[in-house]
C-alpha cells in the first residue's frame, strides 16, 4: 500500500487492473485501518476516474457472494448518498411502493456512513434480518415482490471499510460503488447522484451493461427526485430536464423531506408515510421516485401511468402490505 499511496500522492491515477488488485487485497484483509483511511482520503481530494471505478467495481463483484434470481427481472432504486441533505429514506420507501405495484425489487443497501439512517439501519430497525441465503431471499421475492440485500454480507471489502467510513462521516468513493455492485445484477437500475460529474460517470458505466437504467439528479444537489428543484434524468435513450410539477404535481421545500435526527426518527417517518399518514410533500416525493422506477419497465409506456400506479400502491396500502408480509417471513 505504501508504494500505491506514494504513487497517488504524486497526482497520478490507477489503471483499471491496479485498482482491481487494490480492492481485492483490501477485501482479503491486507491493509490496516490507517492505510485504508489514507487511501480513501485520496478520493476526497479529487474525483475518481472511470478506470479506477471500473477496477474497484470489478474487484467487488469478483469477491461478492453471488445471488441468482433466475428469470425474475428485479429492480433496484438507490441513491449514492453523500449529498448532505439528510432526507428520510426516500429510495427505500420507493422500493416498497414499486413492489406493491407488482414489480419485483432486490434493494441493495448498507448502514449510513455519511447519513444518519442508511437503508440497512432502517430495515434492521423494522425487524428485517440480514442474510445472503439464496433460497430464503428467493422466498421473500416470490411471496412479497421484495427482498433486501445488506451489502456487507455480500461484499467482504465493504464490511472491512464500514467502521472507517462511519468514523469519517463524509462521502467516499464507496458511496459511488454501492449502486454498481448489487449482487443480483438487476434488470432495472435507478440511481440518484449528488452532482452531474458523477452522473456522467454512471452514464458511461451503465451504457455498457445489459439493463434499463435511470440516473436522477435534482439540480439543487439532492441524489434523488426531491421536488425542490428541476431534475435531470438520464436514461439509455438520452437525457431530459423535468420540473417538480411534471414529476410530482408540486414544488416543495427541503425542510418538508427532512429525515430526523436518529434512526428511530427515520423509521417513524417511514412508517407514517407507508401507513398513509404522510404529508402531501412526503407522499409526492416518494410517489415520484417510485414512478420513475416503474417508468423504466415495459409495463408503462408513459410517466403519468407509472405515477398513477405508484400512487395507487401507496394509497391502497399495497406498499404497506409488502413490508408487513416481508417482516412476517423473518420470524
Image (cartoon, rainbow, N blue to C red):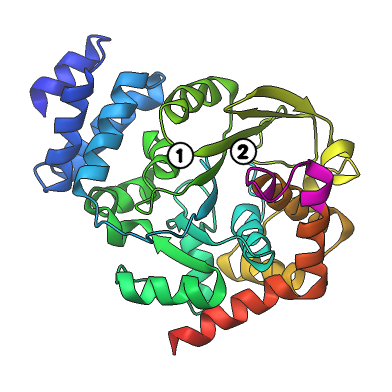
- Is 133 contained in the magenta span? no
Q: Is residue 237 left or right of residue 107?
A: right
For the residues bearing labels 2 and 1, Cβ distance under 8 angstroms? no
Q: Is residue 90 above or below residue 262?
A: above
**Can residue 276 be seen at all in this image of the molecule?**
no
Q: Nearer the viewer, residue 138 or 290?
A: 138
Q: Circle 1 is placed at which residue position?
A: 170
Q: Circle 2 is placed at which residue position?
A: 223
Question: Which element is circle 2 on?
Answer: loop
Crowdedness of circle 2 by 10 Å Cα count: few (<14), some, many (20+)? many
Locate the N terminus and report the quarter of the image it occupies. Answer: top left
Which residues make up the magenta segment? Answer: 294-307
Q: Nearer the viewer, residue 56 or 62?
A: 62
Q: Is residue 191 above or below residue 51?
A: below
Crowdedness of circle 1 by 10 Å Cα count: few (<14), some, many (20+)? some
Determine the residue positioned at 61% across, 81% down. 324
| Residue 318, x across and y down, in percent | 72, 74
Question: Which element is circle 1 on?
Answer: loop
Of labels 2 and 1, the one closer to you: 2
| Residue 37, x across and y down, in percent | 26, 37
Determine the residue positioned at 43% across, 58% down. 111
| Residue 42, x across and y down, in percent | 31, 24
The first of marks 2 and 1 along the sequence is 1
Q: Nearer the viewer, residue 202 or 297?
A: 297
**Residue lying farthest bottom?**
331
- Is 296 contained in the magenta span? yes
| Residue 250, x across and y down, in percent | 91, 43
Amino acid at each position: 500500500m505504501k508504494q500505491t499511496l506514494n504513487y497517488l500522492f504524486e497526482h497520478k491515477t490507477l489503471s483499471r487492473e491496479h485498482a482491481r488488485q487494490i480492492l481485492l487485497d483490501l477485501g482479503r484483509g491486507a491493509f490496516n485501518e490507517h492505510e485504508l483511511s489514507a487511501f480513501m482520503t485520496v478520493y476526497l481530494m479529487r474525483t475518481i476516474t472511470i478506470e479506477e471505478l471500473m477496477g474497484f467495481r470489478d474487484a467487488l463483484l469478483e469477491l461478492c457472494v453471488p445471488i441468482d434470481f433466475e428469470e425474475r427481472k428485479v429492480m433496484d432504486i438507490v441513491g449514492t448518498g453523500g449529498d448532505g441533505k439528510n432526507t428520510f429514506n426516500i429510495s427505500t420507501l420507493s422500493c416498497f411502493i414499486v413492489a406493491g405495484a407488482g414489480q419485483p425489487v432486490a434493494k441493495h443497501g448498507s448502514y449510513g456512513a455519511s447519513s444518519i439512517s442508511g437503508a440497512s439501519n432502517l430495515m434492521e430497525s423494522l425487524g428485517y434480518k440480514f442474510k445472503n441465503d439464496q433460497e430464503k431471499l428467493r422466498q421473500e421475492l416470490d411471496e412479497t415482490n421484495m427482498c433486501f440485500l445488506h451489502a456487507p454480507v455480500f461484499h467482504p471489502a465493504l464490511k472491512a471499510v464500514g467502521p472507517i467510513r462511519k468514523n469519517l462521516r463524509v462521502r467516499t468513493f464507496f458511496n459511488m460503488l454501492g449502486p454498481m455492485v448489487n449482487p443480483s445484477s438487476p434488470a432495472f437500475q435507478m440511481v440518484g447522484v449528488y452532482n452531474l460529474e458523477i452522473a456522467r460517470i454512471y452514464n458511461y458505466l451503465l451504457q455498457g451493461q445489459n439493463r434499463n437504467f435511470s440516473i436522477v439528479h435534482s439540480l439543487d444537489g439532492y441524489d434523488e427526485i426531491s421536488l425542490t428543484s428541476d431534475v435531470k434524468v438520464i436514461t439509455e435513450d438520452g437525457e431530459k430536464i423535468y420540473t417538480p410539477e411534471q414529476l410530482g404535481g408540486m414544488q416543495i421545500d427541503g425542510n418538508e423531506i427532512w429525515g430526523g435526527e436518529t434512526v428511530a426518527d427515520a423509521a417513524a417517518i417511514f412508517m407514517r408515510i407507508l401507513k398513509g399518514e404522510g404529508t402531501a410533500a412526503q407522499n409526492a416525493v416518494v410517489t415520484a421516485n417510485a414512478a420513475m422506477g416503474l417508468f423504466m419497465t415495459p409495463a408503462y409506456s408513459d410517466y403519468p401511468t407509472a405515477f398513477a400506479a405508484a400512487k395507487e400502491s401507496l394509497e391502497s396500502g399495497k406498499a404497506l402490505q409488502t413490508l408487513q408480509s416481508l417482516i412476517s417471513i423473518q420470524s
